[in-house]
Amino acid sequence: MAHLPILQFEEKIMETVEKNPVVVVIGETGSGKSTQLSQMLHKRGYTKTGMVAVTQPRRVAAVTVSRRVAEELGVQLGEEVGYAIRFEDRTSEKTNIKYLTDGVLLRESLSNPELNQYSVIILDEAHERSLNTDILLGLMKRLIKLRSSNLKVLITSATLDGEKVSRFFFDCPVLNVPGKLFPVEIRHSSEKPKNYVEACLKTAIDIHVQEPEGDVLIFMTGQDDIEKLVLKLEEKIQGLEEGSCMDAIVLPLHGSLPPEMQVSVFNRPPPSCRRFIVATNIAETSLTVDGVVYVVDSGYVKQRQYNPSSGMYSLDVVQISKVQANQRAGRAGRTRPGKCYRLYPSMIYHDDFLDATVPEIQRSSLAGAVLYLKSLDLPDMDILNFDFLDPPSVESLEDALRQLYLIDAIDENGSITSLGRTMAELPLEPSLSRTLIEANDLGCLSQALTVVAMLSAETTLLPGARNNTEKKKRKHTPSNLPDGSGWGDHIQLLQIYELWDQTDYSIDWCKENNLQVRGMMFVQNVRGQLTQIMQKMAKESLDVQTSRRHKKSQQDYKILRKALCTGYANQLAERMIRHNGYRTLGFKSQLVQVHPSSVLKADEDGMLPNYVVYHELISTTRPFMRNVCAVEMQWVVPILGRLEKLNIKKLSSGGSDQPEERIQEENSNLEKKVAAHSEPPEERDSRIQAARARFLARKAQK
Ligand code: CDP
Ligand code: MG
């Protein structure tokens, strides 16, 4: 530990912090920013007047780094040193140093806008430019004015974008902690591989056979490929001639690993044993695994991107940026000279790679963020002119405003409603918060809590939903799981949980049904926490119905679907009679299909429900709606009516400007649409009518 570069700069850093409200600290990954700064501040007495908060964009980092710091200080995790991530709080009265995700800190600031419990706030991993960190940067700028006498803010980053952050914070000082990087030899492939899992495998084995000892870190895009490569590598290594190379172990590293597996990469390996660590970009800067000498860089990263003009998410495998490529290479030179094998030509690096990664705020849905900003109640808050380090597009802000208006979080003048305030307090996406509130009013909160908890599971619960190999394997195991009774995925999730509830949460039952045990336990825990939050919010005024046992009935499903329809008002789609696909409703309608993994299937007459709401739109080979729920026309009509009245200018500025042309045009389309609803011409076709009647009759029987 003594060799950590940051420790040599302790005096200088502490002196600068003493004299300045905001300090930017830039230091090579692994230099000790995340684990040491908090301890230095603790040592200097900063924890006497409040806690030191250290934010992390990734949950895994918050957990592993706090565990490490607790170890270094010789204290029990959760006491002097703790962490808080969504749905998991391991802190106590004693806690001095608290690691928390940036999302948790944002939520805390709602109940305590001045964040008085903290004497120091460290925004760690600022270069990651997560949406929440970007919002926090804006907030800190205000907060240091309010608490100039008793708050210190540190912003730490692994890459050299310090000048920009410094300008943002009135030219605050920037401290550079020079890294002790050894030279890293970079080898580019002559061409891009056809199959990059195979290319990684080959490179890894070549290193193992030819190169002296040292661990190998391989950057892949996601869990599926990581699992594939881990299996292949193990197989290949076992196939090598006995005694021809040293021993080797292969370890996966990604955000959805069970906690005990996440920790295992930090354990010392047995002597003369090479470790292969197959990781996502989590190992780029958030986690440092010691002992790495060789890096294999696929050149890709999986990135969730939101397209505000279509309201659609896509999970794309995209090329990394130059900054990322250099970070990855740097992992090889921490303890001695290393090598980085880039599986792409140097021309691609120079000509195709972006200089830096696009910040998340410019590729995310902003509904939650905008609701948050509105709920801060700052007199001079103007969403479109909020002081962002890199402002998001006007389009995505408008998209967020429209959604918030449709789910009653803001009124037509753009002011937050009391419903909106309640929604902001729930640790959920606005659509799900709205669903819970509506469900409570309608008397189906218990069921809605279950559905929302199931949707909040961080991993895939259902068998075969994730990858094809699993699907093939399980094809012959008939599933006894319920099918949503024709109403779609949300109802299926509810039915599954209710069955599990009847077995008294049996682990064997999960296994028998190929349900992910850890995921289901997580859901149970989340459901309990959400229940408590709802109860607390309701206090005495609201009768919150959250009993564990519930009976199934079609009536229950109906009111639950109604609540979902309210929450997902901005995620509504209408069946296209000719295509048997759907068209999303709203500003920009487009044709979409129900995702093949959905339980909502056309019946034997080829009929699908006329209206559905969806949890998300995702663009893979085609635009798909994932997690859909059938809803009824009479619930939809009022929503269409509200769309008609919507005036984005007003929502964002609160003024009474003339609507834009675009809106007028859309509105007139919508008028036609609403008119058409009273008598859809195609529905006059008696054959379709008859099929529809049969369809409805069957639904009613179920
Ligand atoms: O934040 P930064 O990248 O500057 O470094 P850090 O996370 O504070 O890590 C400093 C050192 O602690 C590195 O050598 C890590 O390998 C080590 N560390 C560890 O062994 N186990 C952890 N859970 C976290 C850090
Ligand atoms: Mg760090």
Image (cartoon, rainbow, N blue to C red):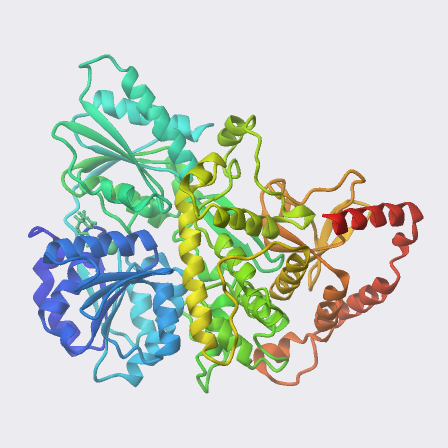
Is residue 335 toward the left or the right of residue 388 in the image?
Answer: left
Above or below: residue 210 compared with residue 509: above
Above or below: residue 164 compared with residue 465: below
Which residue is at the front of the view, 632 or 675? 632
Which residue is at the front of the view, 654 or 510? 510
Above or below: residue 119 compared with residue 231: below
Point out residue 339 in the picture as x, y percentages from the top left corner. 23, 34
Residue displayed at 61% across by 70% down: 407
Quarter of the image for residue 134 reads: bottom left
Q: Is residue 661 visible?
A: no
Is residue 264 toward the left or the right of residue 198 in the image?
Answer: left
Point out residue 686 in the picture as x, y percentages from the top left corner. 93, 48
The residue positioned farthest toward the top in the image shown = 241
Point out residue 550 in the picture as x, y percentages from the top left corner. 55, 57
Is residue 597 toward the left or the right of residue 44 in the image?
Answer: right
Which residue is at the front of the view, 131 or 62? 62
Which residue is at the front of the view, 461 or 643? 461
The number of callouts visible is 0
Quarter of the image for residue 279 reads: top left
Residue displayed at 46% across by 87% down: 379
Point out residue 356 in the picture as x, y percentages from the top left corner. 39, 53
Q: Is residue 356 visible?
A: yes
Above or below: residue 59 compared with residue 242: below
Is residue 303 toward the left or the right of residue 438 in the image?
Answer: left
The residue positioned farthest toward the bottom in the image shown = 379
